[in-house]
Amino acid sequence: MITKIESYINDCKHFVAAAINDVEPFRIKYLGKKGIIADLFEEFKNVPRENKKDVGQKLNELKDIVQEKINEFKLKFEDTTSSLEAIDLSLPGDPVKTGTRHPISIVRNEIIDIFKRIGFTVSEGPEIEDDWHVFSALNFPAEHPARDMQDTFFIKPEDKILLRTHTSSVQVRVMENSKPPIRTISPGRVFRNEAISARAHCIFHQVEGLYIDENVSFADLKQTLLFFAKEMFGEKTQIRLRPSYFPFTEPSAEMDVACNICGGKGCNVCKYTGWLEILGCGMVDPNVLENCKIDSKKYTGFAFGMGIERITMLKYGVNDLRLYFENDIRFLNQFKASF
Ligand code: PHE
Protein backbone atom coordinates (compact mmCIF):
# COMPACT_ATOMS: atom_id res chain seq x y z
CA MET A 1 0.00 0.00 0.00
CA ILE A 2 2.88 2.32 0.78
CA THR A 3 4.19 2.04 -2.78
CA LYS A 4 0.73 2.84 -4.10
CA ILE A 5 0.56 5.96 -1.93
CA GLU A 6 4.05 6.98 -2.93
CA SER A 7 3.13 6.77 -6.59
CA TYR A 8 0.16 9.07 -5.88
CA ILE A 9 2.47 11.43 -4.02
CA ASN A 10 4.73 11.44 -7.02
CA ASP A 11 1.82 12.17 -9.35
CA CYS A 12 0.72 15.03 -7.17
CA LYS A 13 4.15 16.56 -7.00
CA HIS A 14 4.17 16.71 -10.79
CA PHE A 15 0.69 18.09 -11.09
CA VAL A 16 0.57 21.43 -12.89
CA ALA A 17 -2.66 23.34 -13.35
CA ALA A 18 -2.76 25.29 -16.60
CA ALA A 19 -5.76 27.35 -15.50
CA ILE A 20 -8.00 27.83 -12.47
CA ASN A 21 -10.45 25.38 -14.07
CA ASP A 22 -7.97 22.52 -13.64
CA VAL A 23 -7.80 22.88 -9.88
CA GLU A 24 -11.30 21.73 -8.96
CA PRO A 25 -11.19 18.39 -10.88
CA PHE A 26 -7.84 17.71 -9.19
CA ARG A 27 -9.37 18.40 -5.77
CA ILE A 28 -12.34 16.15 -6.48
CA LYS A 29 -10.07 13.38 -7.79
CA TYR A 30 -8.15 13.24 -4.51
CA LEU A 31 -10.30 14.82 -1.80
CA GLY A 32 -13.82 14.15 -3.12
CA LYS A 33 -16.19 11.85 -1.21
CA LYS A 34 -15.39 9.00 -3.59
CA GLY A 35 -11.88 10.25 -4.28
CA ILE A 36 -8.54 8.50 -4.00
CA ILE A 37 -7.85 9.52 -0.40
CA ALA A 38 -11.28 8.36 0.79
CA ASP A 39 -10.61 4.99 -0.88
CA LEU A 40 -7.20 4.78 0.71
CA PHE A 41 -8.66 5.46 4.16
CA GLU A 42 -11.16 2.65 3.50
CA GLU A 43 -8.28 0.37 2.65
CA PHE A 44 -6.37 1.61 5.69
CA LYS A 45 -8.90 -0.11 7.97
CA ASN A 46 -7.54 -3.49 6.83
CA VAL A 47 -3.87 -2.66 7.25
CA PRO A 48 -2.25 -4.89 9.91
CA ARG A 49 -1.77 -3.04 13.13
CA GLU A 50 2.07 -3.11 13.04
CA ASN A 51 2.02 -1.25 9.66
CA LYS A 52 -0.65 1.26 10.58
CA LYS A 53 1.79 3.90 11.77
CA ASP A 54 3.89 3.99 8.58
CA VAL A 55 0.95 3.74 6.21
CA GLY A 56 -0.93 6.40 8.17
CA GLN A 57 2.02 8.78 7.96
CA LYS A 58 2.27 8.30 4.18
CA LEU A 59 -1.42 8.87 3.80
CA ASN A 60 -1.27 12.14 5.71
CA GLU A 61 1.73 13.15 3.63
CA LEU A 62 -0.34 12.59 0.47
CA LYS A 63 -3.22 14.58 1.92
CA ASP A 64 -0.94 17.48 2.77
CA ILE A 65 0.64 17.52 -0.64
CA VAL A 66 -2.76 17.52 -2.37
CA GLN A 67 -3.89 20.43 -0.20
CA GLU A 68 -0.67 22.33 -0.83
CA LYS A 69 -1.05 21.92 -4.58
CA ILE A 70 -4.63 23.13 -4.48
CA ASN A 71 -3.64 26.18 -2.46
CA GLU A 72 -0.66 26.89 -4.65
CA PHE A 73 -2.64 26.99 -7.88
CA LYS A 74 -5.67 28.74 -6.45
CA LEU A 75 -3.43 31.48 -5.17
CA LYS A 76 -1.55 31.69 -8.42
CA PHE A 77 -4.63 32.18 -10.59
CA GLU A 78 -6.56 34.36 -8.21
CA ASP A 79 -3.53 36.53 -7.76
CA THR A 80 -2.92 37.07 -11.42
CA THR A 81 -6.56 37.96 -12.11
CA SER A 82 -6.90 40.41 -9.24
CA SER A 83 -3.53 42.03 -9.75
CA LEU A 84 -4.26 42.35 -13.46
CA GLU A 85 -7.47 44.15 -12.64
CA ALA A 86 -5.71 46.45 -10.27
CA ILE A 87 -2.97 47.52 -12.60
CA ASP A 88 -4.63 47.77 -16.02
CA LEU A 89 -4.68 51.53 -16.27
CA SER A 90 -5.74 51.41 -19.90
CA LEU A 91 -9.25 50.16 -19.04
CA PRO A 92 -11.91 52.85 -19.49
CA GLY A 93 -13.27 54.14 -16.18
CA ASP A 94 -16.83 53.55 -15.00
CA PRO A 95 -18.95 56.26 -16.56
CA VAL A 96 -20.14 58.84 -14.04
CA LYS A 97 -23.63 60.00 -14.95
CA THR A 98 -23.98 63.72 -14.53
CA GLY A 99 -27.45 64.92 -13.62
CA THR A 100 -29.27 67.67 -15.45
CA ARG A 101 -30.70 70.81 -13.98
CA HIS A 102 -34.42 70.74 -13.20
CA PRO A 103 -36.47 72.64 -15.82
CA ILE A 104 -37.90 74.89 -13.08
CA SER A 105 -34.35 75.83 -12.04
CA ILE A 106 -33.33 76.46 -15.65
CA VAL A 107 -36.25 78.82 -16.25
CA ARG A 108 -35.89 80.49 -12.84
CA ASN A 109 -32.23 81.21 -13.58
CA GLU A 110 -33.14 82.54 -17.01
CA ILE A 111 -35.77 84.90 -15.54
CA ILE A 112 -33.31 86.11 -12.90
CA ASP A 113 -30.68 86.68 -15.58
CA ILE A 114 -33.04 88.79 -17.71
CA PHE A 115 -34.00 91.08 -14.82
CA LYS A 116 -30.45 91.32 -13.51
CA ARG A 117 -29.41 92.76 -16.85
CA ILE A 118 -31.76 95.72 -16.30
CA GLY A 119 -30.64 96.40 -12.76
CA PHE A 120 -32.87 94.23 -10.55
CA THR A 121 -31.37 92.64 -7.44
CA VAL A 122 -32.53 89.27 -6.05
CA SER A 123 -34.13 89.07 -2.60
CA GLU A 124 -35.27 86.04 -0.67
CA GLY A 125 -37.41 85.54 2.42
CA PRO A 126 -38.99 82.89 4.65
CA GLU A 127 -41.50 80.32 3.38
CA ILE A 128 -43.24 80.25 6.76
CA GLU A 129 -44.70 83.69 7.15
CA ASP A 130 -47.08 85.76 9.25
CA ASP A 131 -50.37 87.28 8.20
CA TRP A 132 -48.91 90.78 8.09
CA HIS A 133 -46.31 90.10 5.38
CA VAL A 134 -48.53 87.88 3.22
CA PHE A 135 -51.86 89.72 3.55
CA SER A 136 -52.34 92.72 5.84
CA ALA A 137 -49.40 94.85 4.68
CA LEU A 138 -50.47 94.13 1.11
CA ASN A 139 -53.81 95.80 1.66
CA PHE A 140 -55.92 92.67 2.16
CA PRO A 141 -58.44 93.94 4.77
CA ALA A 142 -59.10 91.56 7.69
CA GLU A 143 -61.94 89.13 6.93
CA HIS A 144 -62.08 90.48 3.37
CA PRO A 145 -63.06 87.92 0.71
CA ALA A 146 -60.00 88.89 -1.35
CA ARG A 147 -58.06 86.59 1.00
CA ASP A 148 -59.92 83.70 -0.57
CA MET A 149 -58.19 84.41 -3.88
CA GLN A 150 -55.31 82.42 -2.46
CA ASP A 151 -56.30 79.35 -0.44
CA THR A 152 -53.94 79.30 2.47
CA PHE A 153 -52.25 76.57 4.50
CA PHE A 154 -52.22 77.72 8.13
CA ILE A 155 -49.56 76.35 10.44
CA LYS A 156 -50.81 78.03 13.61
CA PRO A 157 -54.17 79.61 12.82
CA GLU A 158 -54.40 81.18 16.29
CA ASP A 159 -51.12 83.07 15.73
CA LYS A 160 -51.82 83.59 12.02
CA ILE A 161 -48.64 81.74 11.02
CA LEU A 162 -48.94 80.35 7.51
CA LEU A 163 -47.12 79.13 4.41
CA ARG A 164 -46.68 82.06 2.07
CA THR A 165 -49.09 82.03 -0.86
CA HIS A 166 -46.96 84.40 -2.93
CA THR A 167 -43.50 85.95 -2.71
CA SER A 168 -45.01 89.44 -2.46
CA SER A 169 -44.26 88.88 1.24
CA VAL A 170 -40.56 89.18 0.46
CA GLN A 171 -41.20 92.53 -1.21
CA VAL A 172 -42.92 93.78 1.94
CA ARG A 173 -39.81 92.80 3.90
CA VAL A 174 -37.58 94.63 1.40
CA MET A 175 -39.76 97.77 1.57
CA GLU A 176 -39.71 97.68 5.37
CA ASN A 177 -35.95 97.36 5.49
CA SER A 178 -34.70 99.65 2.74
CA LYS A 179 -35.28 103.04 1.18
CA PRO A 180 -36.24 103.74 -2.47
CA PRO A 181 -35.03 103.43 -5.12
CA ILE A 182 -35.87 99.74 -4.84
CA ARG A 183 -35.51 97.45 -7.82
CA THR A 184 -35.70 93.80 -6.88
CA ILE A 185 -37.12 90.42 -7.82
CA SER A 186 -38.01 87.64 -5.38
CA PRO A 187 -37.94 84.10 -6.71
CA GLY A 188 -39.21 81.36 -4.41
CA ARG A 189 -41.49 78.50 -3.50
CA VAL A 190 -45.11 79.23 -2.60
CA PHE A 191 -47.98 77.16 -1.26
CA ARG A 192 -51.73 77.15 -1.88
CA ASN A 193 -54.35 74.75 -0.68
CA GLU A 194 -55.46 73.52 -4.08
CA ALA A 195 -56.39 70.08 -5.39
CA ILE A 196 -53.51 68.69 -7.46
CA SER A 197 -54.27 68.34 -11.17
CA ALA A 198 -52.54 68.79 -14.52
CA ARG A 199 -53.07 72.54 -14.21
CA ALA A 200 -52.78 73.23 -10.48
CA HIS A 201 -50.50 72.18 -7.65
CA CYS A 202 -50.33 73.01 -3.95
CA ILE A 203 -46.61 73.87 -4.27
CA PHE A 204 -45.25 75.99 -7.06
CA HIS A 205 -42.64 78.67 -7.78
CA GLN A 206 -42.92 82.35 -8.45
CA VAL A 207 -40.77 85.29 -9.43
CA GLU A 208 -42.23 88.58 -8.29
CA GLY A 209 -40.75 91.97 -9.12
CA LEU A 210 -40.90 95.41 -7.50
CA TYR A 211 -39.67 98.79 -8.66
CA ILE A 212 -40.12 101.87 -6.48
CA ASP A 213 -38.70 105.30 -7.18
CA GLU A 214 -39.84 108.84 -7.93
CA ASN A 215 -41.96 109.11 -11.09
CA VAL A 216 -42.29 105.40 -11.85
CA SER A 217 -45.19 105.09 -14.28
CA PHE A 218 -47.35 102.44 -15.90
CA ALA A 219 -45.34 103.00 -19.10
CA ASP A 220 -42.21 101.85 -17.22
CA LEU A 221 -44.07 98.73 -16.14
CA LYS A 222 -45.17 97.96 -19.67
CA GLN A 223 -41.72 98.49 -21.21
CA THR A 224 -40.07 96.37 -18.54
CA LEU A 225 -42.50 93.51 -19.14
CA LEU A 226 -42.23 93.82 -22.92
CA PHE A 227 -38.44 93.57 -22.61
CA PHE A 228 -38.85 90.48 -20.43
CA ALA A 229 -41.31 88.79 -22.83
CA LYS A 230 -39.01 89.35 -25.81
CA GLU A 231 -35.95 88.06 -23.99
CA MET A 232 -37.85 85.02 -22.75
CA PHE A 233 -39.95 84.03 -25.75
CA GLY A 234 -38.18 85.70 -28.70
CA GLU A 235 -37.74 89.11 -30.30
CA LYS A 236 -41.08 89.01 -32.18
CA THR A 237 -43.19 88.28 -29.07
CA GLN A 238 -46.17 90.56 -28.61
CA ILE A 239 -47.84 91.32 -25.29
CA ARG A 240 -51.19 92.68 -24.18
CA LEU A 241 -52.40 93.93 -20.81
CA ARG A 242 -55.92 93.26 -19.58
CA PRO A 243 -57.46 95.10 -16.61
CA SER A 244 -57.60 92.96 -13.48
CA TYR A 245 -57.79 93.19 -9.71
CA PHE A 246 -55.24 92.67 -6.94
CA PRO A 247 -55.61 94.26 -3.48
CA PHE A 248 -52.01 95.50 -3.54
CA THR A 249 -51.94 97.20 -6.94
CA GLU A 250 -54.05 99.94 -8.48
CA PRO A 251 -54.56 99.87 -11.40
CA SER A 252 -53.96 96.14 -11.86
CA ALA A 253 -53.53 94.11 -15.01
CA GLU A 254 -52.84 90.63 -16.30
CA MET A 255 -50.36 90.21 -19.08
CA ASP A 256 -50.75 87.84 -22.03
CA VAL A 257 -48.14 86.91 -24.61
CA ALA A 258 -49.07 85.89 -28.14
CA CYS A 259 -49.32 82.09 -28.14
CA ASN A 260 -45.93 80.77 -29.19
CA ILE A 261 -47.38 77.38 -30.14
CA CYS A 262 -49.72 78.56 -32.92
CA GLY A 263 -48.19 82.01 -33.44
CA GLY A 264 -51.47 83.70 -32.47
CA LYS A 265 -53.70 81.81 -34.93
CA GLY A 266 -55.48 79.87 -32.19
CA CYS A 267 -54.88 76.34 -30.85
CA ASN A 268 -55.95 74.19 -27.92
CA VAL A 269 -53.10 75.47 -25.71
CA CYS A 270 -54.32 79.08 -25.97
CA LYS A 271 -57.94 77.88 -26.08
CA TYR A 272 -58.26 79.38 -29.58
CA THR A 273 -57.73 82.95 -28.31
CA GLY A 274 -54.18 83.36 -29.66
CA TRP A 275 -53.04 84.66 -26.25
CA LEU A 276 -51.56 83.07 -23.12
CA GLU A 277 -51.73 84.65 -19.68
CA ILE A 278 -48.31 84.69 -17.99
CA LEU A 279 -48.38 87.19 -15.12
CA GLY A 280 -50.22 89.66 -12.90
CA CYS A 281 -49.01 93.22 -12.41
CA GLY A 282 -49.92 96.78 -11.52
CA MET A 283 -48.94 100.01 -9.83
CA VAL A 284 -48.24 99.49 -6.12
CA ASP A 285 -51.24 100.68 -4.10
CA PRO A 286 -50.32 103.77 -2.00
CA ASN A 287 -51.70 101.96 1.07
CA VAL A 288 -49.02 99.29 0.66
CA LEU A 289 -46.26 101.93 0.48
CA GLU A 290 -47.61 103.61 3.62
CA ASN A 291 -47.86 100.26 5.45
CA CYS A 292 -44.15 99.86 4.77
CA LYS A 293 -43.32 103.44 5.84
CA ILE A 294 -42.62 104.70 2.34
CA ASP A 295 -43.92 108.17 1.46
CA SER A 296 -46.61 107.53 -1.17
CA LYS A 297 -46.69 111.21 -2.16
CA LYS A 298 -43.06 111.14 -3.17
CA TYR A 299 -42.72 107.61 -4.50
CA THR A 300 -44.63 105.39 -6.89
CA GLY A 301 -43.85 101.89 -8.01
CA PHE A 302 -44.90 98.90 -10.01
CA ALA A 303 -45.03 95.22 -9.14
CA PHE A 304 -45.52 92.02 -11.06
CA GLY A 305 -45.63 88.31 -10.29
CA MET A 306 -45.38 85.21 -12.44
CA GLY A 307 -45.49 81.44 -11.94
CA ILE A 308 -42.31 79.69 -13.07
CA GLU A 309 -44.16 76.42 -13.78
CA ARG A 310 -46.46 78.20 -16.19
CA ILE A 311 -43.63 79.94 -18.07
CA THR A 312 -41.79 76.60 -18.28
CA MET A 313 -44.91 74.92 -19.64
CA LEU A 314 -45.17 77.51 -22.38
CA LYS A 315 -41.48 77.52 -23.20
CA TYR A 316 -41.11 73.75 -23.42
CA GLY A 317 -44.64 72.60 -24.22
CA VAL A 318 -45.05 70.67 -20.94
CA ASN A 319 -48.72 69.79 -20.58
CA ASP A 320 -48.93 68.47 -17.00
CA LEU A 321 -47.72 70.33 -13.90
CA ARG A 322 -47.31 67.11 -11.93
CA LEU A 323 -44.35 66.08 -14.11
CA TYR A 324 -42.22 68.72 -12.39
CA PHE A 325 -42.52 66.94 -9.04
CA GLU A 326 -42.24 63.30 -10.06
CA ASN A 327 -38.50 63.48 -10.75
CA ASP A 328 -38.75 60.90 -13.51
CA ILE A 329 -35.28 60.82 -15.04
CA ARG A 330 -36.76 60.35 -18.56
CA PHE A 331 -38.57 63.69 -18.19
CA LEU A 332 -35.70 65.56 -16.54
CA ASN A 333 -33.08 64.41 -19.05
CA GLN A 334 -34.85 66.27 -21.84
CA PHE A 335 -33.84 69.68 -20.54
CA LYS A 336 -30.42 71.03 -21.33
CA ALA A 337 -29.33 73.89 -19.14
CA SER A 338 -27.89 76.98 -20.70
CA PHE A 339 -28.35 78.64 -17.29
N1 PHE B 1 -48.91 88.17 -5.94
C1 PHE B 1 -49.78 87.92 -7.05
C2 PHE B 1 -50.14 86.45 -7.09
O1 PHE B 1 -49.46 85.65 -6.51
C3 PHE B 1 -49.15 88.30 -8.36
C4 PHE B 1 -48.94 89.77 -8.48
C5 PHE B 1 -47.76 90.35 -8.03
C6 PHE B 1 -49.90 90.56 -9.05
C7 PHE B 1 -47.56 91.70 -8.14
C8 PHE B 1 -49.70 91.91 -9.17
C9 PHE B 1 -48.55 92.48 -8.71
O2 PHE B 1 -51.11 86.08 -7.67
Image (tube, helix red, strand yellow):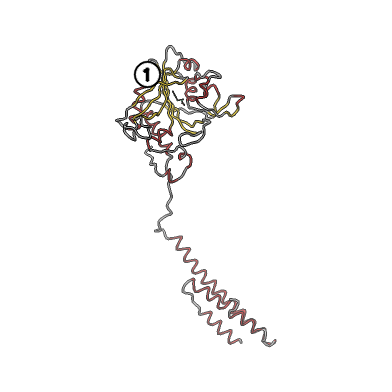
Using the rendered view, name the quadrant where residue 45 is placed: bottom right
Q: Amino acid at mark 1?
A: Phe
338 relative position to 31: left or right: left
15 relative position to 315: left or right: right
Q: Residue furthest right?
A: 49
Q: Mark 1: which secondary structure?
A: helix
Total numbered labels placed on residues in the image: 1
Q: Residue furthest top?
A: 297
Q: Nearer the viewer, residue 184 or 319?
A: 319
Question: Where residue 181 sits: x, y (%)?
Answer: 41, 19
Using the rendered view, name the quadrant where residue 39 is placed: bottom right
Using the rendered view, name the quadrant where residue 264 is placed: top left
Image quarter in which the C terminus is found? top left
Q: Residue at x 54, y 21 (%)?
A: 132
Q: Residue at x 47, y 42 (%)?
A: 327
Which quadrant of the frame does ligand 1 lie within? top left
